[in-house]
Image (cartoon, rainbow, N blue to C red):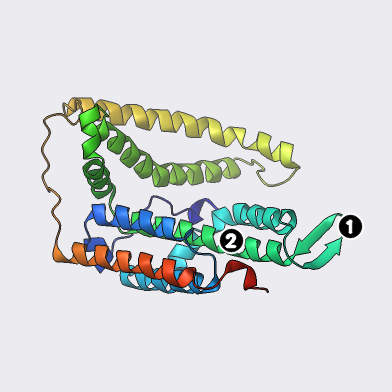
């Protein structure tokens, strides 16, 4: 399961998405995530699916690699589906067992919510797959630059987000090593009830926290040794500049937003019955 977590990891490839300005990818990803809540019909989901499929194709990130990152969130998806399935009381009753009732509205809401969550995670993952941590930091800092006028530490915020994203794969790799070391020493991490399994995680969490604090301390010392004192007066080796492809990407996403609103709302939500 640890190896299946791909959040925050960068996938090197030579694609159009990799060459886009990080500000474009951040803005377009945010617009895409917002668009998933702007339609209430099957045509809207079709448009969103086609758009996401085209973007995945252009990114040159293997589809299996993207889907591998969905395994850790399967439990969240199941909980979301179950809650929406049994707690939404709308439409015709399809099945009733004891106190559990499944209605047409509940089934529809559960399926659509699961699709939205999958698309949310996939769309967000594509941004990190095609953007290096340094580019992501520069993009966030550039987009939030106007907040400097109200004395918001934009550079420091962007730096913290970048470091957090970079630490995710490092800590996952460290967790995998610790688990293998504990298993080699005879630790049983699988058997027992939930309480016993939670207790079995202590030999993993303690060295993991120690390692995380050690890495954080080493990083702080390295930044101080290089005379890092925040973003004031700092220049960039590679300043961000928009190219023609960036404006084209903005235009495509705006067109997609218009299409998903128009097509997604052309058919009322309540007439779609499974």
Position in image of residue 172 (x %, y %): 46, 45
The image quadrant that residue 106 belongs to is bottom right
Q: Tell me which residue sits at (66%, 52%) in the image.
A: 79
Position in image of residue 259 (x %, y %): 39, 70
Judged from this view, the residue extending furthest toward the right is 98
Q: Secondary structure at mark 2?
A: helix
Position in image of residue 174 (x %, y %): 45, 42
In this rendering, the answer to whether 50 lies above or below 75 is below
- The residue tagged 2 is 114
Q: CA distance from mark 2 to mark 1?
A: 25 Å
Circle on res. 29: none
Q: Relative to residue 22, is residue 232 drawn left or right? A: left
Q: Tell me which residue sits at (32%, 58%) in the image.
A: 28
Q: Secondary structure at mark 1?
A: loop
Instruction: Report crowding for label 2: few under 14, some 14 to 19, many 20 or more residues within 10 A (C-alpha).
Output: some
Q: Relative to residue 250, is residue 196 drawn left or right? A: right
The image quadrant that residue 267 belongs to is bottom right
In this rendering, the answer to whether 227 lies above or below 60 is above
- The residue tagged 1 is 98
Tell me the quadrant of the picture where the C terminus can be found. Answer: bottom right
In this rendering, the answer to whether 158 lies above or below 108 is above
Q: Tell me which residue sits at (17%, 29%) in the image.
A: 226
User: In this orientation, does residue 15 appear?
Assistant: no
Instruction: Report crowding for label 1: few under 14, some 14 to 19, many 20 or more residues within 10 A (C-alpha).
Output: few
Which is nearer the eye, 34 or 11? 34
User: In this orientation, does residue 212 appear?
Assistant: yes
């Amino acid at each position: 399961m640890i190896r299946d977590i791909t959040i925050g990891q960068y996938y090197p490839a030579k694609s159009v998405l990799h060459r886009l300005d990080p500000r474009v990818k951040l803005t377009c990803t945010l617009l895409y995530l917002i668009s998933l809540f702007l339609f209430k019909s099957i045509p809207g989901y079709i448009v969103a699916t086609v758009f996401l499929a085209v973007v995945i194709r252009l990114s040159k990130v293997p589809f299996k690699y993207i889907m591998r990152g969905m395994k850790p969130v399967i439990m969240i998806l199941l909980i979301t589906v179950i809650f929406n399935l049994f707690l939404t009381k709308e439409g015709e009753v399809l099945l009733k067992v004891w106190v559990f009732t499944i209605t047409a509205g509940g089934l529809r809401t559960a399926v659509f919510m699961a699709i939205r969550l999958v698309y949310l995670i996939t769309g967000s993952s594509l941004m990190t797959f095609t953007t290096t941590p340094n580019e992501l930091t520069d993009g966030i800092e550039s987009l939030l630059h106007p907040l400097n006028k109200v004395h918001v530490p934009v550079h420091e915020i962007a730096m913290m987000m970048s470091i957090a994203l970079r630490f995710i794969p490092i800590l996952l790799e460290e967790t995998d090593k610790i688990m293998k070391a504990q298993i080699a020493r005879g630790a049983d991490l699988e058997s027992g009830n939930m309480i016993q399994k939670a207790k079995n995680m202590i030999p993993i969490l303690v060295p993991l926290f120690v390692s995380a604090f050690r890495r954080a301390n080493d990083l702080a010392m390295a930044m101080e040794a290089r005379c890092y004192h925040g973003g004031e007066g700092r220049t960039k080796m590679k300043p961000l500049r928009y190219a023609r492809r960036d404006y084209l990407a903005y235009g495509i996403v705006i067109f997609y937003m218009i299409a998903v609103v128009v097509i997604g709302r052309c058919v009322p939500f309540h007439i779609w019955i499974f």
